[in-house]
């Protein structure tokens, strides 16, 4: 049994298709089929049930893939540990980020990190929190910047900071008067039960948080618009289309010409816990650890 055969089998299991697996592995499909047949013959079991359009794991195949993934993870761990020993601070880190985090926090973090570690290559993956959890659990990123709670049980995390949540309303909204003449008057979430909400689309963790906070206050938010972009949401609020909840770091740095009025929420002030998440048991390179430390230090300066 060879490591490449384990890799081939895992790719077939992921793609459920020989042609796509061969393409991803950059080998000819007949070669892939031949290697799998050799592996099955050596093991004495059938790993996949083939038909004309797809392949499905057998019971033996499912057990094999579970162990094969552990072996490949151990090999990757060994490679990364050896790279750290030989390269010290050089290396590569693949970081997943939610769009709202990438737009407003990474510009503060990445320049500092590059000044301190100029030889470390950073690759960014930007996606919804739901997809980032899947990518990180599948080993497609070393770590991801997310907020609690996490849905993927195979992930663990390090907390890097607490971010308060604010309310954004149009300048013409009656609540906007609370921001005038000194310290703004906090708003209770239950005061918003009759308001029209503009929220992020499904798959974004902050959308779920908005719904949870409203439900805890005794009502279901009436959603009139949805967007994948928090900047778009804030611009729509500013033009009078509705209201929204906004993470405070974002409220501090609006980039659009359409800027809403931001108000604090009443005690207990809701917040979200920002975390760096990674697959449980995965080896974190020294480069990844350095990025986490830089992020923590930068966030302290922003608070």
Image: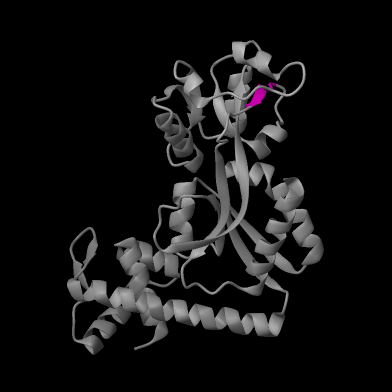
Q: Residue at x 41, y 84 (%)?
A: 3
Horizontal and vertical percent position of residue 302: 74, 46
The front one of 67 and 43 is 67
Q: Quadrant of residue 154?
A: bottom left
* Residue at the extreme front of the image, as rendered: 267
Horizontal and vertical percent position of residue 129: 49, 47
Q: Residue at x 72, y 74 (%)?
A: 90
Q: Could you tell whether 111 is left or right of 13 in the image?
A: right
Task: Tell me which colouring the rendered structure shows.
Answer: one colour
Q: Could you tell whether 299 is left or right of 144 in the image?
A: right
Q: Quadrant of residue 9?
A: bottom left
On screen, residue 176 above or below 130: above
Q: Residue at x 55, y 26 (%)?
A: 244
Q: Residue at x 58, y 78 (%)?
A: 80
The front one of 194 and 181 is 181
Horizontal and vertical percent position of residue 194: 45, 15
Is residue 260 part of the magenta span, yes or no?
Answer: yes
Q: Could you tell whether 138 is left or right of 41 in the image?
A: right
Q: Is residue 88 visible?
A: yes
The front one of 87 and 22 is 87
The front one of 232 and 223 is 223
On screen, residue 88 above or below 236: below
Q: Is residue 173 visible?
A: no
Horizontal and vertical percent position of residue 24: 43, 65
Residue extent of the magenta highlight: 258-263
On screen, residue 3 above or below 262: below
Is residue 217 part of the magenta span, yes or no?
Answer: no
């Amino acid at each position: 049994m060879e490591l490449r055969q384990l890799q081939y089998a895992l790719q077939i299991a992921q793609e459920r298709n020989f042609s796509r697996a061969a393409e991803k592995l950059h080998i000819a499909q007949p070669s892939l089929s031949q290697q799998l047949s050799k592996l099955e013959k050596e093991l004495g079991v059938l790993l996949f049930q083939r038909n004309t359009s797809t392949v499905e794991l057998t019971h033996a195949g499912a057990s094999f893939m579970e162990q094969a993934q552990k072996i490949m993870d151990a090999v990757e761990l060994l490679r990364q540990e050896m790279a750290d020993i030989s390269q010290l601070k050089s290396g590569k880190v693949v970081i997943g980020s939610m769009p709202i985090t990438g737009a407003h926090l990474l510009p503060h973090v990445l320049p500092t990190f590059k000044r301190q570690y100029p030889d470390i290559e950073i690759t960014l993956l930007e996606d919804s929190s739901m997809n980032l959890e899947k990518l990180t659990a599948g080993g497609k990123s070393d770590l991801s910047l997310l907020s609690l709670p996490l849905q993927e049980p195979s992930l663990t995390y390090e907390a890097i900071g607490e971010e308060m949540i604010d309310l954004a309303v149009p300048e013409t909204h009656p609540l906007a008067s609370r921001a005038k003449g000194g310290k703004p008057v906090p708003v209770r979430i239950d005061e918003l039960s009759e308001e029209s909400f503009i929220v992020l689309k499904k798959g974004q963790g902050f959308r779920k948080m908005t719904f949870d906070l409203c439900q805890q206050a005794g009502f279901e938010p009436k959603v009139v618009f949805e967007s994948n972009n928090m900047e778009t949401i804030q611009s729509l609020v500013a033009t009078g289309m509705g209201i929204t909840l906004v993470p405070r770091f974002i409220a501090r740095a609006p980039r659009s010409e359409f800027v809403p009025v931001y108000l604090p929420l009443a005690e207990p002030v809701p917040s979200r816990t920002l975390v760096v998440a990674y697959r449980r048991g995965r080896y974190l390179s020294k480069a990844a650890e350095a990025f986490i430390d830089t992020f923590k230090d930068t966030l302290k300066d922003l608070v």
